[in-house]
Amino acid sequence: MSQAMSTEKFRFVLTTGVCLALFYAIAFSVFGFDHRSLLVLMVLSATPVLLLSFDLALLAFLGSLFAVQDVSIFKVVVPCGLLLVAAFLFTHRSLQRKDFTSPVSRALVVFLLTMMPSLVNSPSIPRTLLYMVNSLAFAGVVFVLSAGLDTLRKITIPLTVFGALVLANSVFVVGSSAFEKGRLYGIPGVVYVDFVVMMIILCIVLVFYSRKFVRYAAVCAVILGLVGLVLTQTRNTAISLVITLVMLLGYLLRQPWLVGMNRKRLVTIGVTFAAIGIVAVGLTLALAPQVLYRTADISRLAEYEMRTPEDFALNSFVTRSLIWITAYDAFRAHPFIGIGALSFPFAAREYFTIPPVLFNRFVSGYAPHITYLSVLAETGLVGLAGFIYLVWVSVRTAFASVRLSKTPDDRRISMMLASVQLYIPVSMFLTDAWLWGQCGMLWALILGLTTANYLRLTRESELVEYA
């Protein structure tokens, strides 16, 4: 049997290699040695190897989260997510339907189904379907991670790799601040603002469940992450971080036994982290005072006089309000099933009521910047209901895992996943990046790990009951 499998794999690799050789010959003769062509060819070269190893495909997927390169209209992480699904299907052949069944999987199917009616109103169904590949890749990653990661170690490794990569980028951002001015994001681009907040939350939770060296290292990582966050000059993620931490502290104060502490000590730790945050922000502002400028812009909103289109660009709140107005107009036109899933950047042209010069300058090609508003405009009340159901089930499943956890290690990973899962719906009030691209695939990663952890704990609980 193993010999047959080896022969099959050999034939697959040989066939793929011949096809790639022919593809290279055509690509180089047509496109030359353009850097994008070379990037695509490098990815294709690695494809056969990644298809033979789910673990390597997962590592490649984690790395691609930090890549800003585009493949057509997609960030490179989206095709890497599809590659991860293909690797799973190629390497896991003995799984059953029950391995994919969970509250999250059912909610995910419901959400995908509620998106479909919006196609009726899309100005370009093929284009809408192409953008919906983001959603299909999202669902695929969630399904394969939930079924393929069946042990605590397998679940912990991707989360650890992600945190380590964000920490390394934070070092790069802080180091770059000595030589560069303006907003700094490092290697992954603007999505770093959400990545670093997640790393901060993970490390804060780690403090509660660790001792000595690991605890001190986690505190240092939190400080470094806060400095990196301030250097991005991003208000939205900072607000979402504070809200999430307050909610998390409230949850732990109600159930302090989850971290083995009394309420007094929890409050003390909360105050300590608040002080650390203030010190980190103060130190950053002292070293790089220019980061105050963007924060001050919103307080000077009333001073602006909008006489020309250029005046609207003086404040991001003003420009986003133009997008929100257009999204509302789109919702009014099709309140029940929307204008087309993920289609607002090109479909909004059919519905705007603001002056054309402002639409072309500040709205065309952009998304609404609020996840819930984006879903409402693009898929209507039907799609929003399905989406809210998915978000609710996701958070409920994450905290159900916390309650199912029996050992300190189980509680640590469950609480870490629940905390970052809680951050995502909070952040959705201030950004729509969770629907596509790097942040969309990061949510798929967290949701897949959360589901895998829930299924693992459920199986172990059932075994204990039958014992």
Image: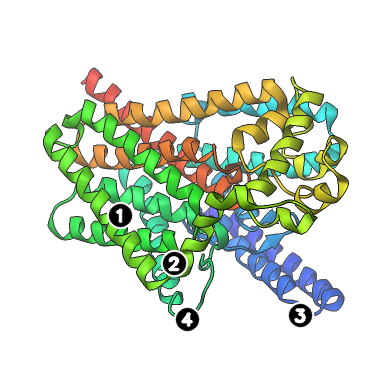
Upstream in sequence: badge 2 or badge 4: 2
Which tag is nearer the camera, tag 3 or tag 1? Answer: 1
Separation of residues labelled 2 and 4 (CA atoms): 16 Å
Along the horizontal axis of the image, is 60 left or right of 8?
A: left
**Could you tell me the amino acid type at mark 3?**
Phe
**Could you tell me the amino acid type at mark 1?**
Gly
Identity of the residue drawn at 14% across and 36% down: 260
Which tag is nearer the camera, tag 3 or tag 2? Answer: 2
Which residue, given by chain and number where applicable, does mark 4 sit on?
179
Residue sitting nearer the eye, 87 or 176: 176
Upstream in sequence: badge 3 or badge 2: 3
Residue sitting nearer the eye, 140 or 69: 69
Along the horizontal axis of the image, is 435 left or right of 449?
A: right
Q: Secondary structure at mark 2?
A: helix
- The answer to whether residue 8 is above or below residue 418 is below
Which tag is nearer the camera, tag 4 or tag 3? Answer: 4
Upstream in sequence: badge 3 or badge 1: 3
Toward which corner of the image does residue 415 lie, by quadrant? Answer: top left
Toward which corner of the image does residue 384 lie, by quadrant? Answer: top right
Which residue, given by chain and number where applicable, does mark 3 sit on?
33
Separation of residues labelled 1 and 2 (CA atoms): 19 Å
The picture places residue 169, in percent across and down from the top left corner, at: 44, 67
Residue sitting nearer the eye, 62 or 344: 344
Which residue, given by chain and number where applicable, does mark 2 sit on?
169
Along the horizontal axis of the image, is 49 left or right of 102?
A: right
Which residue, given by chain and number where applicable, does mark 1 sit on?
277
- Residues marked 1 and 2 touching at CB (< 8 Å): no
